[in-house]
Image (cartoon, helix red, strand yellow):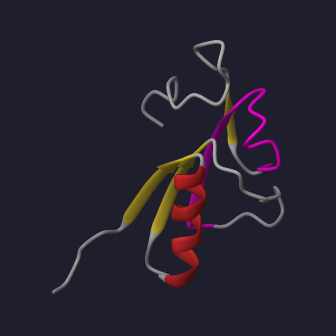
Amino acid sequence: MTHDVTTVVGHSLGGAVAARMTEDYPGLQARTYGAPLLHTRFAKSKQVKSYRHYGDPVSFFDRSAVMLAPDRLNPHSYEGFGNQ
């Protein structure tokens, strides 16, 4: 059976799992939201596109993430990412 999955998406711990899956499957892309990743601007993965809200303590160390302002009082919410 062949699966045509090219992108996996996850929030928080699910985002970390999605990013980790790209290491095992080189053709896979990941999109993460508020994930606890340790990426720097210089060691950025081309397979992982990450987003985080300002003030999110869970994704604080993901320095390569695109940072957005949260819509609500909870900066770790999955809401407010729009069409990212």
Q: Residue at x 70, y 46 (%)?
A: 65
Q: Is residue 71 above or below residue 37?
A: above
Read off the magenta span: 46-63
Name the residue at the left extreme. Answer: 1
The percent position of residue 82, horizontal first and vertical second, equals: 45, 27
Q: Residue at x 41, y 60 (%)?
A: 8
Q: Residue at x 24, y 73 (%)?
A: 4
Of residues 65 and 60, the one nearer the viewer is 60
Q: Is residue 26 above or below residue 14?
A: below
The percent position of residue 58, horizontal first and vertical second, equals: 73, 41
The percent position of residue 39, horizontal first and vertical second, equals: 77, 59
The percent position of residue 79, horizontal first and vertical second, equals: 50, 25
Q: Is residue 60 above or below residue 21?
A: above
Q: Which quarter of the rendered picture does the N terminus lie within?
A: bottom left
Q: Is residue 26 above or below residue 4?
A: below
Determine the main secondary structure of the stretch shown in magenta.
loop
The answer to whether residue 64 is magenta is no
Name the residue at the front extreme. Answer: 13
